[in-house]
Image (tube, rainbow, N blue to C red):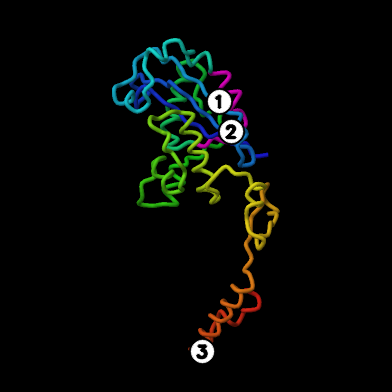
Amino acid sequence: MTRQIVLDTETTGLNPRQGNRIIEIGCVELVNRKLTGNNFHRYINPERDSEEGALAVHGLTTEFLSDKPKFSEIAEEFLEYIQGAELIIHNAPFDMGFLNAEFELLGRGSFDQYVGTVIDSLVQAKELHPGKRNSLDALCDRYEISNAHRKLHGALLDAELLADVFLAMSRGQNSFISLDDESERVVETVEQVVVDDGPYEVLVQRANGAEVDAHCKQLEDLGKNGSSVWGQNQSEMV
């Protein structure tokens, strides 16, 4: 079983070393690349105001957060939730930096020591789409994931969007539709093939008769202008 936690935070500002704190944590659980609904979401009282720029991004006022638990009150529950999971974070150094600072304030060392693997989806996106915008909004547009309801940043909402984006980037699956449901909607020429080294199935679409005939005709045309390398293994290809 592969358990992954897609994580996002909202904060009072950009730099934890300047006294900025976490005000919201949102986590979405994936088990074997499927949503489980076992999510983690907490608002946190940072015991300080948000900077003006940060407030414009998340809209979480000091008044709203005043009766929420402090980080010390949710830390143990949070650690229990992420235990043994691989973390997926967009621009991981930012969130990890704040989480490290929060645990250091509690005298519990660095958050890094409680975590195994961390996947930075921003790094992954830059490798897949070099030279392009790779913000969460840009990736949602690129992979046709609706984020029309995202007026302000929110940790849980952003984690949900990132989970969808991560699946699309790492496997080409653009939605959380289960493979069982997806296989029912494909045409009869689609064959399910079990992959030996993974816990999931790959859908393979075989060419139909008309497509095979068109392919053979194309190879014949290529052969008229000389020897066609493709034609040498025609029987294997179709």
The magenta span reads 75-88
Residue to which mark 1 is pinned: 40
Amino acid residing under circle 2: Glu
User: How far is disc 3 from disc 1 in space, using C-alphas?
Assistant: 64 Å
The residue tagged 2 is: 29
Question: N-terminal of the two: label 3 or label 1?
Answer: 1
Badge 3 crowding class, 10 Å Cα cut-off, few under 14, some 14 to 19, many 20 or more, is few
At a point 45% along the width and 37% down the height, the residue shown is: 90
User: Contact, CB < 8 Å: mark 3 with mark 1?
Assistant: no
Q: Tag 1: residue type?
A: Phe
Q: Position of residue 113 (x, y in %)?
A: 54, 28
Q: Position of residue 183 (x, y in %)?
A: 65, 52
**Left or right of 238 on screen, residue 96:** left
Instruction: Report the disc number at residue 224.
Output: 3
Up/down of 39 relative to 125, above or below = above
| SS category of the residue bearing label 3 | loop
**Above-or-below relation of 116 to 144:** above
Give 120 or 146, whichever is nearer the viewer: 146
